[in-house]
Image (cartoon, coloured by chain):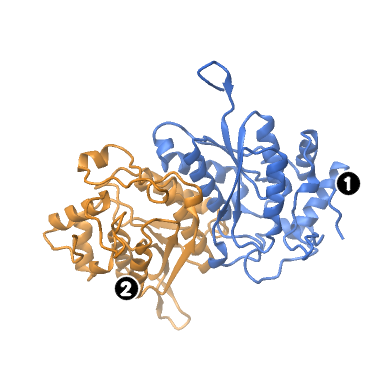
Chain colours: A orange, B blue
Amino acid sequence: MVHAPDGSPIAPKAVVLLSGGLDSTTALAIALSEGYETYAISFNYGQRHLVELRAAERVANTLRAKEHLVVNVDLRSIGASALTANREVPKGRSLDEMSGQIPVTYVPARNTVFLALGLAWAEAIGARHIFIGVNALDYSGYPDCRPQYIEAFARVANLGTKAGVEGRNFEIHTPLINMTKSQIIRKGLELGVDYSLTHSCYDPAADERPCGQCDSCLLREKGFREAGVRDPIVVR
Amino acid sequence: MVHAPDGSPIAPKAVVLLSGGLDSTTALAIALSEGYETYAISFNYGQRHLVELRAAERVANTLRAKEHLVVNVDLRSIGASALTANREVPKGRSLDEMSGQIPVTYVPARNTVFLALGLAWAEAIGARHIFIGVNALDYSGYPDCRPQYIEAFARVANLGTKAGVEGRNFEIHTPLINMTKSQIIRKGLELGVDYSLTHSCYDPAADERPCGQCDSCLLREKGFREAGVRDPIVVR
């Protein structure tokens, strides 16, 4: 813990990647519970489910993030994902189908782009901690959610920044990496997270209601079911 | 070399990070000379010297890049650099002053952000080669221009993408990394590069003329002087 000139502790700053979904919201709550002053960062990247940015804002406000920055980065111009392009989001898939291969909702190098921007902000505000709510266990379809990937990115962060070169090393925190969805939900509820604020659906209706059938909705449903609690968001 | 069904060689695709400056323009010419089909990518990141995007467009057209993509990414919202914020660009510094420390024109994690976006595009278009005109020798002020940083990023690229996981490894090419500015210029001239198309100044006048006094102008001037050729861009 760092201390102010008068001896009182100063909370270390942490940048938290916040999509407004269940995982990143829980990661923010964990960062807060561990005593960090949190700086939430979200991305307007041309996602078709822009409603998640409104969820991120609600979450950042409710969890009293010190700041909430929304960075515009046009991944749509790069293309190649059902989340940004006009491609159909798969519906009603089984867990086997989900974990068997990398889904069409995969956005090329998305976590690398988001971590790079989170790192840039961390360096700009003098934060050395970055939280990301990746999860390698319950949903292994995305390669950029694995521990070895996160370690490799930490090396990039420390070699490629002024702060890193000067010895102020960055730490990438992944508090959810080994948790199941239901463990994440239980942890969040323990910390008082109101999951009605969050948004998970890849393909919401115009009135923001989740579709209930995309991978993200199905994993959320399974998580709440296994945690033995009711999802405060009504699905259909 | 990959071959088409009829046996004719297909040029491998390469994404080339193109700022429109002297280094990235030479990197593009080198990629072309090595037989790649080039995909130039530039960034509208809130830089005060937006004129460089016009230079990038001229260069991409003249060097016949297959495509030229300009990605909007708002690094200005992240702040902390004289290149994006309202901070003064240093003028008239000696080479000792330039190499002694990381300059205020340093944009936090910029190459990491740009490489991440270049990687995303590479994956989207099925390219496995990425060219970046970083240069560790003549101007060591930026940490994200060093070989060990580039190697670390390659590891991130291969661990964090669908292509990498599936064994289609990415290669980050840094043809200029051990060249002096004058060697870069000589190489470019050898390849027929027209440097009058390029733009280097951090703080150009309204009519696009370079200031002649910022680090970038001074390094360019020194490069042409040492190469024994006249810079086709008239300074002042």
SS at badge 2:
loop
- Numbered disc 1: secondary structure: loop
Q: Residue furthest front?
A: A206
Q: Is residue A109 left or right of residue A31?
A: right
The reply, left or right, for residue A175 in relation to residue B110 is left
- Residue at 70% of width from left, 37% of height from top? B29
Between residues A169 and A210, which one lies in front from this camera angle? A210
Q: Which residue is mark 2?
A: A63
The residue depicted at 58 percent of the width and 36 percent of the height is B14
Q: Amino acid at mark 2?
A: Leu
Location of residue B68 with respect to A201 vertically, above or below: above
Specify the subunit that label 1 lies on: B
Q: Find residue B100 and report its image quarter.
A: bottom right
In the rendered view, would you say A102 is above or below A24? above
Q: Judge by depth and name the residue closer to the eye, A37 or B2.
A: B2
Q: Is residue A35 visible?
A: no
Image quadrant holding the C terminus of chain B, namely bottom right
Q: Position of residue A117 (x, y in %)?
A: 49, 58
Q: Which residue is mark 1?
A: B230
The amino acid marked with disc number 1 is: Arg
Label 1: how many residues lie within 10 Å, few (<14), some (14-19) or many (20+)? few
Verify CB contact (< 8 Å) between mark 2 and mark 1. no
Chain identifier of the residue bearing label 2 in the image: A
Measuring from the top left, give residue A227's x and y in whole percent.
Answer: 14, 58
Residue A139 spot, x, y in % from top left? 27, 46
Q: Is residue B93 left or right of residue A187?
A: right
Q: Which mark is residue B112?
A: none
Q: Nearer the viewer, residue B165 or B151?
A: B165
